[in-house]
Every structure is written in C-alpha cells, then in structure tokens.
Image (cartoon, helix red, strand yellow):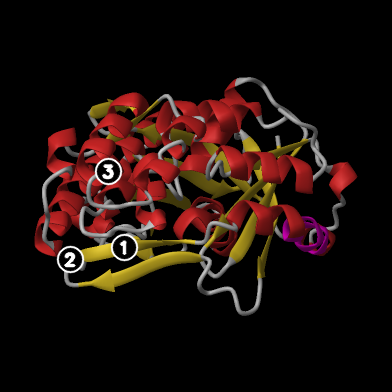
Amino acid sequence: MTTSAVLVSLASASPPYQFMQADIGAEARRIFSHRYRDFERLFPVFRNTGITHRQAVMPMEWYFEDRTWPERTAAYLTGAVDLFCAAAEKALAQAGLTAAEVDTVVTVSSTGISTPSLEARAMGRMGFRADVMRVPVFGLGCAGGVTGLSLAGRLAQARPGSVVLMVCVELCTLACRLDELTSANIVAIALFGDGAAACVVRSGGAGLAEITAAGEHTWPDSLDIMGWNVDPLGFGVIFDRAIPTFAEANLRPAMHGMLAGMGLTLDGVDRFVCHPGGSKVIEALEKSLDLGQGALTFEREVLSDHGNMSAPTVIFVLERALAAKTRGRLVMASLGPGFTASCLSLAA
C-alpha cells in the first residue's frame, strides 16, 4: 500500500521594499503618459487590480531607469537567493528540521536565469548536505506553486521517509520595462510583486494536510496567452487581455476533467485555493466554478497585500487558509503559461 505524501509545513517570505499601489501608478504616469498614447486609457488598471501595496527586491527608483539584462540578472541572483533562504529556513523551522535533514530540494522559478540554479547557490548558506537531490524547475510561471508542490509530493512518495523541500521564488518586478510601450507591459507594472514560499513534504506521518492527487490541463493552440518574450534587455511579458474571459469560459469543463481523474467532483470540494492573478481573474474563477461572488476571500487578501507574485502566490493563499483553520477537501488551482491549469487535492 502506497503511503500518502503529507504537507508538514509551509512558509512565505517577502523582500524588503514595499510600494503603495497609488505611488506606482503616479510614477508610471510620469514616465509613460507622454510617450504612450494609450496610457491614460489603461491607467484605471492601477486602481482596479485590487492591490493596496506590494513588495520588491529593489527600491522603486531602480525600476524607473533603463536596465540591461546583466543588471536584471544580478538583481535576480541576489534577491532570489535571499528570498529562497528566508522562506526555506522558516518552513524548516516550523517542521522542526534542519537543512542537513533535507534529502530533495525542488526549486521553482521562471523570472530569472540561474546556472548553477538557486538551491546550489544557497547550498552553503543553508547547510544542505553534499548528497542532496536538486530538482530545479523553470517555465511554469503562475502554475509553478501548485505543480511544484505536486512534484514534491510525488518525490516524497517515491522515497518513503525522505524529506522534500519545495521552494518557489519569483521576482516578477524585474520584467517591468521602460522600453515596452504595450498594454501587456503596463498591466505587468500594475500587477507584479516579488515573493517566495517554501513547503516541507514527506511521506506519512502528521502534518498540515495530506496530498492526495493532482491534475493538469493544457489547452491546444494557446501558447500566446501568457509567457515571456526574450530580447537583449531581458524578459518581456506576454499577457492576453482575454485571460479572465478565457478562464471564465473554459476552466469549468477542464476542472471537471481534472477532478474526475482524482475521483472528485466540484460538489466534493470544500474550498478552492486559487492563484489570484488579478481582481478580474478572481471574479472569473468564482463565476466559472460557481463559487459565488466574494467567495475567494483569502485570494483577495493576498492580492491586496502582495500583488501577483506568480508561482508563490497560491502558497501565500494556502498559508492563510490553513491559518484560518480551513478544513476538509481543499483543491489548489493555478493558471499558467502553456496555457495550462494545474490543480492539487489536499485533505486538511
């Protein structure tokens, strides 16, 4: 009989610089309004995102100067390693473990390029063993938190008794560009924040929740909905304006299929734990899954306090849900590049 994987602990970490949404909007207007004729038409997005403030790895003035890819990469390497360590140390402390007891590290990040990968760069600082298994994962975007935790669960099941640490780190703000006079870039500036989250997973024993099943659904011919453009200055965001509309129209049948594969139905889910991509995305999820307007309260709170941090954001939501003693069948759900829906079933 296969022993289930258990979520033993989870923790979140935020970088030191906090920006008020109103201040970001004012700076963006100063920089873009005279250069981009559609800016004023797009400006309401700064008020309508549902964000109050968010955090970043660099001070605000850093973002409003032209930056090269080497400069962005240097900021990524320093900021991502710091956040990796902060989140991982908190999760391990909550589990009563040390880094030397970790057998596998799954690192999820899509907002920078690092070879050696982040867990290797953090190895000496954290105190991982020389024989720790390293599993870096790139390219999942906003779906990375759910898929990364699913992968951690499967790796824990494959090696009973082992300790798996999953860390997702995203520095989305580093993709904000002054040279991109596009609606996608303006929306990114209005939405993106930085953050990290870590989870400790092992097979069997006590914990916060049992990881019971996972599912994914990738829509055909959807590569242009979300992702990165890569050019000499770094990453440039790809955002289709129809993401909320697409999610509202297409998520429900895909979710039916994923849940059926896990032996579940929509009626059997006590609480969806979703990635809050933005206020319109949250509303689309509520409509598509027939949750009722305003049901995704933790999602709105995290979006308000941190913005869209990509992969770690859904772990921030799960952290609040579990802290509020949310119990029963929880299903985590995220939408990411692919265009892909990823979900994970938890028994809490």
Q: Distance between the residues labelled 3 and 1?
A: 20 Å
Reply above or below: 17 against 88: above
Q: How many labels does the image show?
A: 3
Q: Three-letter amino acid code at disc 1?
A: Gly
Q: Three-letter amino acid code at disc 2?
A: Leu
Instruction: Report which residue position mark 1 lands on.
Output: 236
Q: Which of 336 and 281 is in front in this view?
A: 281
Instruction: Report which residue position mark 3 lands on.
Output: 33
User: Along the polypeptide, which appears first: circle 3 or circle 2?
Assistant: 3
Do the residues bearing badges 1 and 2 touch, measured as CB atoms within 8 Å?
yes
Q: Residue at x 28, y 72 (%)?
A: 230
Instruction: Report which residue position mark 2 lands on.
Output: 233
Residue 328 relative to residue 315: left or right: right
Q: Nearer the viewer, residue 267 or 206?
A: 267
- The residue range painted magenta reads 250-257
Within 10 angstroms of label 1, few (less than 14), some, or many (20 or more) residues?
Answer: many
Residue 163 relative to residue 208: left or right: left
Displayed quadrant of residue 258: bottom right
The answer to whether residue 229 is visible is yes
User: Along the polypeptide, which appears first: circle 3 or circle 1?
Assistant: 3
Q: How far apart are marks 3 and 2 (CA)?
A: 22 Å
Displayed quadrant of residue 191: top left
Do the residues bearing badges 3 and 1 touch, measured as CB atoms within 8 Å?
no
